[in-house]
Image (spheres, grey):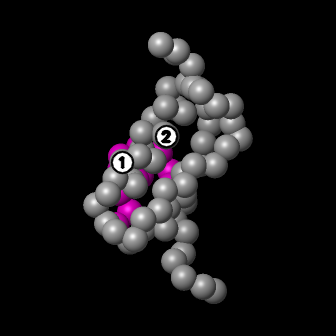
Amino acid sequence: MTTTFPVKPPFLAVTAAKKGGVGKTHLMATVADLLALNGYPFTAFQADDKKRLATLIGAKVVDLPKGGA
């Protein structure tokens, strides 16, 4: 078992689904935790109406506007 993160930043991780409740926020919170535990800086973005990611990861999350300009 490895104790290091399998990729080196910078990288982009995205989750998307048409249906709610499938684990998108949970998955991104897990990725953020892995980055933080391995000492990598990260910026989290979300385009979700529910805004739960900041509560889960305890870090600043940038809210992206939904839709066009």
Question: For the residue labelled by badge 2, is the local secondary structure a helix, a strand or a loop?
Answer: helix
Q: Residue 13 colored magenta?
A: no
Answer few, some or many: residues within 10 Å of disc 1's Cα (few below 14, many 20 plus, some between 14 and 19): some
Q: Could you say where residue 26 lies in the image, as x and y percent from the top left? A: 36, 48
Residue found 52% across the figure and 15% down from its top: 3
Q: Which residue is mark 1?
A: 26
Q: Which residue is mark 2?
A: 32
Task: Please state which of the two labelled residues, at mark 1 or mark 2, is closer to the viewer.
Answer: 1
Q: Residue furthest right?
A: 10
From this view, report whether residue 27 is shown above or below residue 63.
above
Relative side of 57 to 43, left or right: left
Q: Residue furthest left?
A: 21
Q: Could you say where residue 36 lies in the image, as x and y percent from the top left? A: 52, 32
Q: Residue 58 colored magenta?
A: yes
Whole-number angstrom distance, CA of label 1 to CA of label 2:
10 Å
Find the magenta span and give its range.
50-61
Question: For the residue labelled by badge 1, is the local secondary structure a helix, a strand or a loop?
Answer: helix
Q: Quadrant of residue 39?
A: top right
Q: Could you say where residue 53 lies in the image, as x and y percent from the top left? A: 40, 53
Residue found 55% across the figure and 69% down from its top: 64
Q: Residue furthest bottom?
A: 69
Relative side of 52 to 9, left or right: left
Residue found 57% across the figure and 25% down from its top: 5
From this view, report whether residue 11 is shown above or below residue 48.
above
Q: Could you say where residue 47 lies in the image, as x and y percent from the top left? A: 49, 68
Relative side of 24 to 15, left or right: left
What amino acid is labelled 2 in the image? Ala
What amino acid is labelled 1 in the image? His
The C terminus lies in which quarter of the figure? bottom right
Relative side of 31 to 53, left or right: right
